[in-house]
Amino acid sequence: MTDSGSNFIKAFSVFGSQDPSKEAELEEDSSEELQTDYLDTFSILEEDSGLEYQLPQHQRCAAHLLNLVATTDAAQAEEKNGTYKWLLRAAFGKCQALWNKTGRSYIAAEIVEDECKLQLVRQNQTRWNSIYMAVERILRILQQEGEDAIRNVCEKFGVTMLSPAEIAFLSEYYIAMKPVVKFLNILQSETNAYMGWLLPVIFQLQAKLRRMEASSKMCLPLIRAIQDSVQKRFGGMMEDPELIAAAILLPKFKTTWTENTDVIEAGLAYEKTLLEQMTQGDMEQVGQHSSDEVDFFNEIQKDTEYRGA
C-alpha cells in the first residue's frame, strides 16, 4: 500500500499485477501530484537478469486519497458555482488577513488573547485539516465571546469584519467538512488499522453527505464535489469483494454497515469461494501426506518380506 507518488505508480505499472480498468485512473491521479525526481527502477531491475520481479496489485493509500478529496477535488466546487466561489474567497480572504496578522507579530497575538480569550489557529499548507481547525477556532470564539470580540480584533488590525453571510458560510463549511476530517482521523488511527474499516468508513461518509444535502444552502456545491470525488476515487474499492469480505468479517460491522444487499452478497460469495479453496487445498495436502506414508511404509514391508525369503 502506497500513496499516489509517480515513482510508486511507475514501479507498480511495470512490475505489478494491474487491473487494466484502473490504468487510466492511475495516470490521471499521478498528474495531480507535484513532479518529483525518482530513480528509473525499470533500468535498475533489468540489469539483473538472474531474478524475476513481480509486485502484487497496487493498493492505494485511502488516507492519501481522502486528502486529495478534501483539497484538489473540493476546490473544483468553485468552478461550478459563482456564488459559492464569491463567498468562499470573501470569507477566507478576511480570515487569512487575521491569520497573517497574528503570525507576524507577538503584539497582535496578545491583542487576540485579550479580546477573544483564545489564540487563533493558523492554517498550514502541508496539512489541509489545519484550515478546518482554523475555521473551527474562529467559530468557537464567535460562539463563546460573541461577534464583538472578533470585531474589536478586526478594528485594531485594520481588517474588514466578517459579514453575517460570511459567518454563516464558515459555519456551513465547517459542518460540510467535519465528516471528512472525522473519517480521515479514523483511517489514520493506529488502533483501528484493519482493512475491514475502509468500506464502512466510506459508505458512512457518503450517507452523511447525502443527509447534509437537504439542509445546506451555501455549501451544496462543496458537498456535491466531495460526493463526486469519493465515487471517483473509491468507486472501485467499494466493489472489491476482498474489501467487502474484510468489513463483514469484523465483528464491529458484520453486515450492518450498508443497506445494499448486492454488496453484502458479493462479499459473502467471496468468503464462500475462499473457504472452498482452502478446504480443497487441505484435502489435497492430507491426501499427499497419506500417499507419502503408504509409499514409505511399503518400502519397509518389502524389505521385511525380502529378508524373510
Image (tube, rainbow, N blue to C red):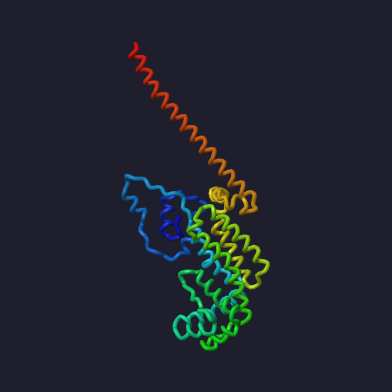
The residue positioned 31% from the left and 50% from the top of the image is: 47
Asked if residue 114 shows in the view, the reply is yes
- Residue 190 locus on image (x, y percent): 48, 58
| Residue 86 vertical placement versus 186 (above, below) | below
| Residue 272 vertical placement versus 260 (above, below) | above
Q: Is residue 272 left or right of residue 30?
A: right
Residue 173 figure quarter: bottom right
In the rendered image, the quadrant that contains the C terminus is top left
Total numbered badges shown on the rendered structure: 0
- Residue 237 locus on image (x, y percent): 54, 54
Residue at far right of view:
214
Residue at far top of view:
309
| Residue 178 vertical placement versus 232 (above, below) | below
The residue positioned 44% from the left and 26% from the top of the image is: 291
Which of these two is toward me, 83 or 204? 204
The residue positioned 65% from the left and 70% from the top of the image is: 216
Which of these two is toward me, 98 or 225? 98
- Residue 134 locus on image (x, y percent): 52, 74
In the rendered image, the quadrant that contains the N terminus is bottom left
- Residue 21 locus on image (x, y percent): 52, 52
The residue positioned 46% from the left and 53% from the top of the image is: 58
Asked if residue 28 shows in the view, the reply is no
Q: Is residue 293 left or right of residue 258?
A: left
